[in-house]
Image: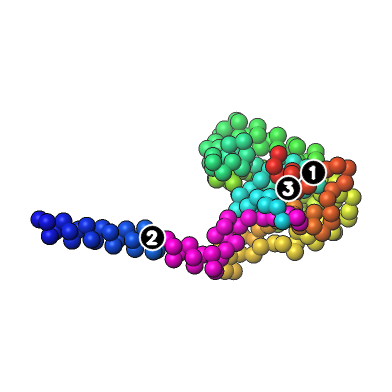
């Protein structure tokens, strides 16, 4: 019995060292060496080097001069501690009323927009944290952003189109744009919006 106990104890210690110490340290070291940006949370920085968020988690932008993301049912919106969808079904009056209100607001804020309203501007993701939009949803917002910044729509369109992300490995997913990355690029390329509007970083924090 004593011999079997010692064998089991040694096996337990070796297993703990291998799987609880050596393996995690090796994986963490490899991640930091090969994918440091992703391993540290894909953090985004403003022009001063300040961390303004993560490219993996959406943020709420309310200023007209910035690209706005999808609705979020996570907490008060994009709350990473309350990741969830609304769980409202297609027969839900609350869901229909919320979507109708968003449609009316988006058209009111962007009356010069051409074409139908892209669906992802009024539909929340299952996690409530989606940081991306379809290129169509981003380009639909160009007239509002251009007017708020006092520049031509073509300049806004160029910033967006230059940052469209393709399918992963050319096969998986759909083309998309990262909302925070676009808004930081707008400030970088065109400067902060006039009329006392907030920067991308401070707007996201609201």
Which residue matches tag 3? 201
- Select label 3 or label 2 by which is in front: 2
Disc 3 and disc 2 in contact, CB within 8 angstroms: no
Q: Furthest-top residue in view?
A: 93
* Residue at the far left in the pictured view: 1
CA separation, marks 3 and 2? 38 Å
Label 1 – label 3 distance at C-alpha:
8 Å
Mark 2 lies on residue: 21
- Give the total number of marks visible in the rendering: 3
Q: Which residue is mark 1?
A: 198
**Residue 37 counted in the magenta span:** yes
Residue 111 in view here? no
Dot in front, 1 or 2: 2
Which label belongs to residue 176? none
| Disc 3 element | helix
Find residue 74 and report its horizontal and vertical position in percent: 58, 39
- The residue nearer to you, when weighing 62 against 121, is 62
In primary-sequence order, the first of circles 3 and 2 is 2
Please name whichever residue, 86 or 116, is drawn nearer the observer in this view of the structure: 86
Placement of the C terminus among the 4 image quadrants = top right
From the viewer's perspective, tell me whether residue 2 is left or right of residue 64.
left
Q: Residues within 10 Å of mark 1 (few under 14, many from 20)?
A: some
* Label 2 SS: helix
Q: Residue at x 58, y 55 (%)?
A: 41
Asked whether the viewer can see residue 31, the reply is yes
> Which SS does the magenta portion mostly show?
helix
* Residue at x-position 68% and y-position 47%: 69
How many residues crowd mark 3 within 10 Å: few (<14), some (14–19), many (20+)? many
What residue is rendered at 74% in x and 43% in y? 203
Give the magenta range: 24-48
Q: As displayed, is residue 9 above or below residue 87?
A: below
């Amino acid at each position: 019995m004593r011999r079997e106990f010692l064998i089991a104890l040694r096996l337990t210690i070796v297993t703990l060292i291998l799987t609880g110490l050596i393996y995690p340290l090796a994986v963490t070291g490899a991640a930091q060496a090969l994918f440091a940006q992703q391993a540290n949370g894909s953090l985004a920085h403003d022009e001063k080097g300040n961390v303004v968020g993560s490219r993996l988690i959406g943020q709420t932008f309310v200023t007209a001069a910035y690209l706005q993301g999808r609705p979020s049912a996570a907490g008060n919106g994009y709350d990473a501690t309350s990741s969830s969808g609304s769980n409202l079904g297609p027969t839900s009056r609350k869901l229909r009323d919320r979507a109708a209100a968003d449609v009316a607001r988006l058209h009111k804020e962007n009356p010069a927009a051409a074409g139908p309203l892209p669906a992802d501007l009024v539909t929340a993701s299952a996690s409530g944290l989606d940081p991306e939009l379809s290129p169509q949803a981003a380009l639909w917002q160009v007239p509002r952003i251009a007017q708020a910044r006092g520049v031509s729509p073509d300049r806004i369109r160029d910033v967006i189109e230059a940052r469209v992300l393709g399918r992963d490995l050319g096969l998986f997913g759909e083309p998309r744009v990262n909302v925070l990355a676009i808004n930081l690029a707008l400030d970088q390329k065109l400067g902060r919006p006039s009329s006392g509007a907030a920067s991308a970083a401070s707007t996201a924090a609201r």
